[in-house]
Image (cartoon, helix red, strand yellow):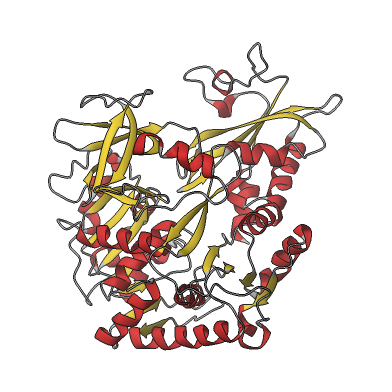
Amino acid sequence: MRTLCEALETGAAQSGRSPCLVIPARPERDYDPAGLEWTYDDVAGRVQRLVDRYAAAGYGHGHRVALLLENRPAFMLHFLALNRLGACVVPVNPDYRHDDLTFLLRHSECDLAIGLAHRLGDLQGAVTAIASGAQVVDVAQFDDALPTARRPALASRPDHDSLGTILYTSGTTGLPKGCLLTNAYFFFAAQRYLAAGGVMRIGTACERLYNPLPLFYANSLAISNPAMILSRNAMIFPDRFHPKSWWQEVSQTRATMVHYLGIVAPVLLSQPPSGLDRAHAVKFGVGAGIDPADHAAFESRFGFPLVEVWGMSEVGIACAANAEPRRIDTRTFGRPLPEVELKVVDEEDAEVPAGTEGELVLRRSGSDPRRGLFAGYWKDAATTEEAWRHGWFHTGDIVRRDDDGLYHFVDRKKHMIRRSGQNIAAAEVEACLHQHPDIARVAVTPIADDLREEEVLACVVLRDSVAGNAELAQAITAFALQRLAYFKAPAWVLFLDELPVTATQKLQKSRIFAPGEDPTRRPGMFDCRPLKQARRAR
């Protein structure tokens, strides 16, 4: 098998009547409100029809196609069809707005964008702004509206090294980086997932994975979905995380596995006890970031283990706490999965002894340390090589390894804001806010949030004669909401007379607040979370 779609076709040949793609029923949803369940034969047939249509229009190996299709079945069908032809998919976060879209479409140089009807105007506006010439197509009118490709496809057949997707992940320098993921990545990520064993034992043609994480995440698109396809198991796609109906959907879809982020556990624990709490068939959950204070309580109430793992878009899942004792009272993410080597290093890249904090670095075992991991950052060879210095991929996470060989998360080396599992680069938000006519200087930092781990705080110095007040704070957040994905917009705005800088005028964010200070009590601080949540609810 050379491509992920060929793995799907193999699954259809071997287990054609087994469930492949499942959507929970949700009456208020504007697509498939009654839910659906397609077999491997169903999915393979639908994908082949798309393959034929794309090929007839001249699309194939080497083309890049953006998909703005949310977590709908159409996303997976188009992704697999394009994968079969060797075209590279560029997933689009549905929360993206004009600035995000223009960057992504310009940087990826997409030939085509497939979107939902209510987002076509946004896509077309971005394409027009960058004058790229990319075609924009309504997915509902795909058969009739697909234009002929503007350039020829490559003559070669797609293989393991062909690009499957460019996944954009927030970069510490501000603009997102495009992670190049090949078919080799899909297969290696899936094989590690399936080989983990222990508490994570996965059968063949008998499991059903309920995954509320979005398809523009590596977790779903590039790791767990390939694993389900290779093992002929079912993928269950809710549109997003719904706390109040979580257990109903898990039970209704007969899920045997679930995925989670750290935010899921406390939110589900906060729901009133229900007869649905254990009316399910879940064997285990897989995720990251659960607070140790919630871990035992969750497992006791809901009756299955949560397996903490460590991973990132560039390398997939590399570690799992899948063997007892799992040490759920700590922040351990376990030990390396098969064919992955880890070590903890200091600032000079020298390995540190057990118990000492340092940066986590990794590589694949064998002669080629990069094989099956990401193929680089799109248009950024220098950053790629810097990340791979001395033959090891540098993750930017600070960890420690204990005497039992378990790895424990400590912090992120390169400062990012992590909100509900989303990585947000402060510099990207700052670049947006600097365009506001009333802002002279701005520093964006994380602020602790009980529900979302961290929120976005904008520390603002205004231009002369402009007064900071609640109305202006709301206007600043609204300004960002018009230009960025809603989750990147400031939830808090603090007006300051000046920002701390060094003698060379380098910003010192660490000096904005005193150690132990509660930023929310600082005079000039305004809470804009309701405005941000109102945008999310739309």
Residue at 39 percent across and 65 percent down: it is: 183
Camera-nearest residue between 205 and 314: 314
Residue 293 image point, x, y percent: 29, 40
Which residue is outermost to the right? 465
Residue at 63 percent across and 45 percent down: it is: 489
Residue 354: image quadrant is top left
Residue 162 image point, x, y percent: 45, 65
Camera-nearest residue between 513 and 369: 369
Residue 367 image point, x, y percent: 26, 48
Residue 397 versus residue 488 in the image, above or below = above
Residue 519 image point, x, y percent: 56, 26
The answer to whether residue 487 is left or right of residue 248 is right
Camera-nearest residue between 141 and 512: 141
The answer to whether residue 498 is left or right of residue 527 is right
Quadrant containing the N terminus is: bottom left
Mark count? 0
Residue at 54 percent across and 63 percent down: it is: 91
